[in-house]
Amino acid sequence: MAINVSDRAAQRIEEIRTAENRTGNCLLRIGVAGGGCSGLSYKLDFDEDGANKEKKDQVFESHGIQIVVDMRSFLYLAGTELDYTDGLQGKGFHFINPNASRTCSCGESFAV
């Protein structure tokens, strides 16, 4: 099971890359860390030229975005889609994670 980004998320990621003058092979690193209201929090960052890429990292491509995930995080994120919304209910990236048994109301943390 891969990790995917929606069309809207891919467009927003490209806008951020351009605004931050990130060029070359800039990967999107998605991860999970302990913390947050529900126990686990999502992490998003750029990995310039795969400089932080480890041997066991999982690499995916979705809508032209290269995604890298460490193996521990991948166990929690397999099958997840990263989406972006800018509506009245909130603006930002949102994870649609089929592995989450519950999420907090802000959507930034989850439990399995």
Image (cartoon, rainbow, N blue to C red):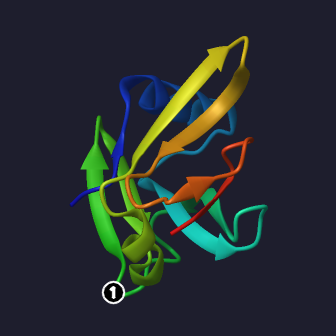
x, y percent for residue 2: 25, 57
x, y percent for residue 95: 51, 45
Q: Please report the residue visible at 70 percent of the width from the left and 50 percent of the height from the top.
A: 104
Please determine whether, in this image, residue 55 is positioned above or below residue 13: below
* Residue farthest to the left, as pictured: 1
x, y percent for residue 45: 62, 57
User: Residue 55, located in which quarter of the rendered image?
Assistant: bottom left
* Residue farthest to the front, as pictured: 101
* Residue farthest to the top, as pictured: 88
Image quarter of the N terminus: bottom left
What amino acid type should be assigned to the residue bearing mark 1? Lys
- Whether residue 80 sits left or right of residue 21 in the image: it is left
Classed neighbour count for the residue bearing mark 1: other residues with Cα under 10 Å, few (<14), some (14–19), many (≥20): few
Q: Please report the residue visible at 72 percent of the width from the left and 18 percent of the height from the top.
A: 89
Please determine whether, in this image, residue 56 is positioned above or below residue 84: below
x, y percent for residue 99: 40, 61
Please determine whether, in this image, residue 86 is positioned above or below residue 110: above
Q: Please report the residue visible at 38 percent of the width from the left and 31 percent of the height from the top.
A: 6
User: Residue 25, located in which quarter of the rendered image?
Assistant: bottom left
* Residue farthest to the bottom, as pictured: 55
Residue that badge 1 annotates: 56
Please determine whether, in this image, residue 101 is positioned above or below residue 18: below
User: Residue 33, located in which quarter of the rendered image?
Assistant: bottom right
